[in-house]
Amino acid sequence: MAAAKHSQISTICSLLLLCATLPLMAAAAAQQRKPSVAVEGVVYCLSCKYAGSGSLIDATPIQSANVSVSCANSGVYQINQTDVHGYFYSWLDGPKLGRGGLGNPIQACTVKLVSSPLEACNVPTDLNHGNDGAKLRFEGKVVKSPHYAVFYAAGPLAFRPQMCAN
Ligand SMILES: *[C@@H]1O[C@H](CO)[C@@H](O)[C@H](O)[C@H]1NC(C)=O
Ligand SMILES: *[C@@H]1O[C@H](CO)[C@@H](O)[C@H](O)[C@H]1NC(C)=O
């Protein structure tokens, strides 16, 4: 009798446990299916020859340039650096993103030039709105590895030389 009662109780307990964990498992699965969001772009130094026109002809990538990525309403503001190819990317999801997340990154986020390490090429230009905030574009880039992520592009952005010899 006592054994039967015990097993009844443990059945109820495990059912309750199942009911309690199912939503958690579903939430975890949804979390996994939700892609990370990244922004990428390239920062150049405009060639003196074409700097006036804002053309990227003969422009050279800038390594260790800093760009900021900010997203309205989600508190995202981060500074990321370009690599040797002038390429930067920025993961936008962090623990500080609340339940609301980013919203639509295309509407919420912009990228700005912050600094260039090159004394000879450190004047930010507004090419593609590098000064007042470049909008993001979705170009169909979705990667599966190292984890599921959707990439948005901004720019290309550019600094220009302060002085150009003629
Ligand atoms: C970009 O900057 C943020 C904040 O400084 C940092 O957490 C992150 O690791 C950097 N790199 C990328 C690729 O997001
Ligand atoms: C870019 O940002 C990094 C990290 O915040 C900083 O150490 C570095 O001095 C910055 N570079 C320039 C050129 O401002």
Image (cartoon, rainbow, N blue to C red):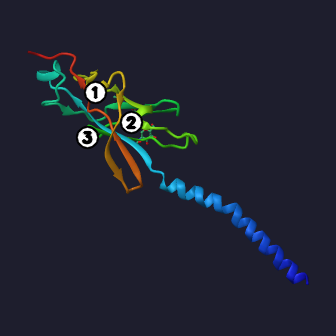
Q: Is residue 163 above or below residue 103?
A: above
> Mark 3 packing: few (<14 Cα in 10 Å), some, or many (20+)?
few
Specify whether residue 89 is in view. Answer: no
| Nearer to me, 92 or 103 | 103
In the image, residue 84 sits, relative to residue 67, either above or below, namely below
According to the picture, the residue beneath numbered tag 1 turns out to be 128
Which labelled disc corresponds to residue 84?
A: 3
Q: Position of residue 106 (x, y in %)?
A: 40, 35
The C terminus appears in which quarter of the rendering?
Answer: top left
Q: Please give the residue where the numbered disc 2 appears in the rendered image.
A: 80
Outermost residue on the right side: it is: 1
User: How far apart in space, not on screen, are marks 3 and 2 (Cα)?
Assistant: 13 Å
Tag 1: residue type? Answer: Asn
Displayed quadrant of residue 20: bottom right
* As drawn, 121 above or below 99: above
Q: Is residue 12 visible?
A: yes
Q: Nearer the viewer, mark 1 or mark 3?
A: 1
If the image is split into quadrants, where does the N terminus sit? Answer: bottom right
